[in-house]
Amino acid sequence: MKYSSVTFTSTAMQEWQKDLLISSLADIGFDTFEDSKGGFTAYIPFVNFDVQALETLLLRDVNGFDVQYIAQDLEEENWNELWESNFKPITVDDQCYVRATFHEDRPDMAYQIVIDPKMSFGTGHHQTTSLMISYILEGDFQGKDILDMGCGTGILAILALKRGAKSAHAVDFDDICIASVEENKVLNNVAPLTASLGSKEQLEGRQFDVILANINRNILVDQFDQYARSHSANGVLYISGFYAHEDLSILRAKAASVGYRFDDYKVLDNWCAAQFTKI
């Protein structure tokens, strides 16, 4: 597949501002990011690159700091192969080891998840995924029916099943993610895992004991009403994909309006995850 790259540089951009910009770029189709001198480089399939959409995003989202960018079209390359070469195993809370098929086995770990790395979100390397993994390691999943919303590779659903969940359903709007879930389901031998392509319409008429949603603030706000309809009484909701200072109060207010009690939150590098209970 042919890709385009856009290299962003700034003399004043702080780390949290860079994270916000990367999140916005992901919303318009950029799927891979790497640090570079003075900023970062973002990659997008050539056919999806819309300069006007990029300019609109920068005018809307870049406030209080300057950003310059240089875009270029790249020669065709095996991007998955390149991405895989940079995929490193991680450990969360000294309990959960996330690795690829080509990494060393760690049978000494309490939980080991094998992910066939594709260019999809959810390998455990992002702070929000690590925060959600930490919540799953602490929570009660025994015999529960689980929803993994915005599933990426399915890593959260897989861990929930390894923690004793009865079943898990994964939903994502990206067909690459759905294919990845099916592959990783086999790699991790977690049979009661299903996946469907789409968004909140996939939840109609379904009930879950625990909902895991690692997306972003705007989508979470939009989907909270459906979560409430699809949640059993006293069900637990874990959310991430947003910032502690900018977003948590907005999400707490929305959650309360549809019948959730706020229980707890975690922060890592200003990224946030939160726990709620349906009342």
Image (cartoon, grey):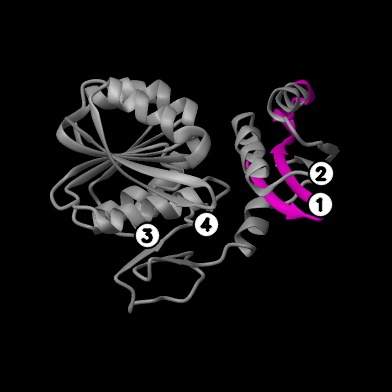
Q: Residue at x 18, y 56 (%)?
A: 164
Q: How many marks?
A: 4
Q: What amino acid type is highlighted by mark number 3?
A: Leu
> How far is the residue under mark 3 from the one under mark 4?
19 Å
Residue type at the position of mark 1: Gly
Please identify, in this view, whether the residue under mark 3 or under mark 1 is nearer the observer.
1
**Residue 135 image position (x, y, % from top left):** 32, 52
Check disc 1 and report the residue beneath it. Answer: 38
The residue segment tinted magenta is 31-52
* Circle nearer the N terminus (2, 4): 2
Q: Which residue is mark 3?
A: 187
Residue 74 lies in quadrant: top right
* Residue that label 2 marks: 10
Residue 73 in view (yes/no): yes
Give the x, y percent position of residue 88. Answer: 56, 66
Q: Which residue is mark 4?
A: 125
